Image (cartoon, rainbow, N blue to C red):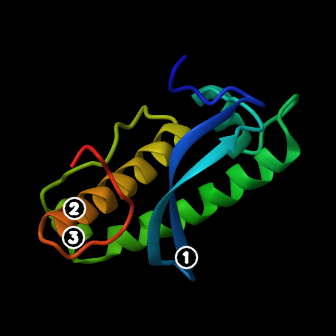
Amino acid sequence: RLASLNPRERRKVISFEFQIQGDEVVNRRFFRSVVTSADKLDYSQATSVLSGGPASGVNPQVVRSLRALHSLTNRLMARTANDNFGALLRSLDFKLGSETELPAQKLVEYWMVEVNEFAGHQLSERRNGLCCGLFCPML
């Protein structure tokens, strides 16, 4: 419950923002913010929304946003699959995610990896004296 984003509850978070142009992430940043979640969906509900299924009881803005994010994520994943790293993974017969993984799980996994890579890069730059971003008292 501590880390959950229950509907209509304000939570202090560290937000990660990705600026996209076409099918490319051109800028990333993170900052402290307060969010109020509009809805709460489990993976099955989110997958139903992503597949165009019924979204009864789900905020229409959440449905539009989730479907737009899914479309964008699919384009970015396809682009990654076609770059040199993607070719290497295919040559090693490496599979991202399991075959039984729900589309909503793949969506969350993709963005969790993006956030973790960006956070790791920022922390590395901070240790090297190159980063002047968000103050983090844990460092």
The mark that comes first in sequence, 2 or 1, is 1
Q: Nearer the viewer, residue 120 or 80?
A: 120
Disc nearest the viewer among 2 and 1 = 1
Residue 85, numbered label: 3
The residue positioned 70% from the left and 29% from the top of the image is 40
Real-space CA distance between mark 1 and mark 3, rounded to the nearest whole angstrom:
20 Å
Tell me the amino acid under the disc marked 2. Answer: Arg
Q: Nearer the viewer, residue 119 or 78?
A: 119
Cβ atoms at labels 3 and 2 below 8 Å apart: no
Tell me the amino acid under the disc marked 1. Answer: Ile
> In the figure, residue 52 lies in which quadrant?
top right
Q: Secondary structure under badge 2?
A: helix
**Relative image position of residue 112 (x, y in whole percent):** 40, 48
Q: Nearer the viewer, residue 18 or 15?
A: 15
Residue 20, numbered label: 1
The residue positioned 54% from the left and 74% from the top of the image is 19
State the residue lying farthest toward the top. Answer: 1
Neighbor class of circle 1 (other Cα within 10 Å; few <14, some 14-19, many 20+) is few
Real-space CA distance between mark 2 and mark 1, rounded to the nearest whole angstrom:
26 Å
Q: State the quadrant of the N terminus.
A: top right
Real-space CA distance between mark 3 and mark 2, rounded to the nearest whole angstrom:
9 Å
The residue labelled by disc 2 is 90
Cβ atoms at labels 1 and 3 below 8 Å apart: no
